Image (tube, rainbow, N blue to C red):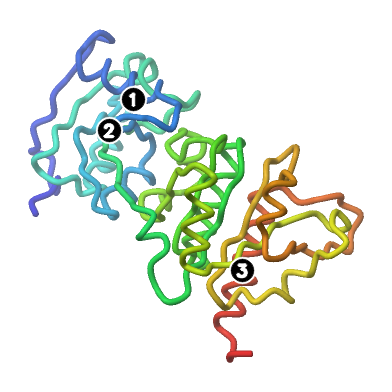
Amino acid sequence: MPTVSDRSRLISIVQSRQNARVRELRAAFARTGRDVSEVIGIEGEHLLAEAIRSGLRIHSVFIRVDVDRRDASLRMLERLAIPAPVPIISLNAAVFSSAVDTESPQGVAALVGTPRFSLAAALAGPRPLLLVTAALQDPGNFGTLIRSAEAFGATGVLALPGTVSVWNAKALRASAGSAFRVPVIYEKSWPAFAALAERHIPIYATVPTGAAQDAIPCSSADLAAPAAILIGNEGSGLSAEFLDRAAACITIPTPGPTESLNAGVAASILLYEAARQRASPPR
């Protein structure tokens, strides 16, 4: 596919904050709920490169071109190798900053189509490994969790009501692009647990050390088999209803005096333990 490989590419120059494309980019960043449209705004060279690598549809690219940084901006376009049909809009610093979400913009933003995943895709394969988030509200934690899910081979993330949007700008940045590829499925609690039960996937509820008398260390849980790891809210943890649905409660042994780990770190450690078990000979 032809790409932006030279400096002859025609770039539209926009100098008004009220331009229709600029307003569309601003509106995309303003959407924060789970029910976002099929087009989202992303900002930064890395995220745009990840979106292209993931095969997402790139609707338009916005580049900040200052007089003293024109060559650097053009070199960035060359590195990104944007498909030729994608329109590129040049904005001055003031107009660009008025449309994007960050306080210190990196100089490139884009409107991209969101991927579509299904619960069936997340449950696919002989040994599904899922993270189930119960009202996880911190976008940084959620993005970290998604990044770790891809790194350690999880098949998906099942987000129960109250969980922050995967397309929240902070969550997306924390995922470092993994959100473009990891199936993140939003589902109500009852259908989600019913789907897990139908596939005979046991649920492991994550609790702090000492929070449950019958809790076992994560190394003692059989995470090499199909498994769903339940992560609770940062402040209140898991409700009694969720704990009752679990096949077992698991903990991460912490010899230090720390009361608990944050959700992103805890999920990452548990996913690593699952990957370690799956790479070892069968028990």
The answer to the question of whether label 3 and label 1 lie on touching residues, with beta carbons closer than 8 A, is: no
Q: Which residue is mark 3?
A: 272
- Of callouts 3 and 1, the N-terminal one: 1
Q: The residue under label 3 is which amino acid type?
A: Tyr
Query: Residue 151: horizontal and vertical position, in percent?
Result: 50, 64
- Of callouts 2 and 1, the N-terminal one: 1
Q: Mark number for residue 28?
A: 1
Q: CA distance from mark 2 to mark 3?
A: 33 Å
At x 77%, y 63%, the residue is 252
The answer to the question of whether label 2 and label 3 lie on touching residues, with beta carbons closer than 8 A, is: no
At x 84%, y 57%, the residue is 212
121 lies left or right of 221: left
234 lies left or right of 228: right
User: Residue furthest toward the right?
Assistant: 257
SS of the residue at dot 1?
Answer: helix
Q: CA distance from mark 2 to mark 1?
A: 7 Å
Query: Residue 156: horizontal and vertical position, in percent?
Result: 45, 58
Q: The residue under label 2 is which amino acid type?
A: Val
At x 50%, y 61%, the residue is 196
- Of callouts 2 and 3, the N-terminal one: 2
Q: CA distance from mark 3 to mark 1?
A: 34 Å
Q: Which residue is mark 2?
A: 39
How many C-alpha atoms fall within 10 Å of the one at disc 3: few (<14), some, or many (≥20)?
some
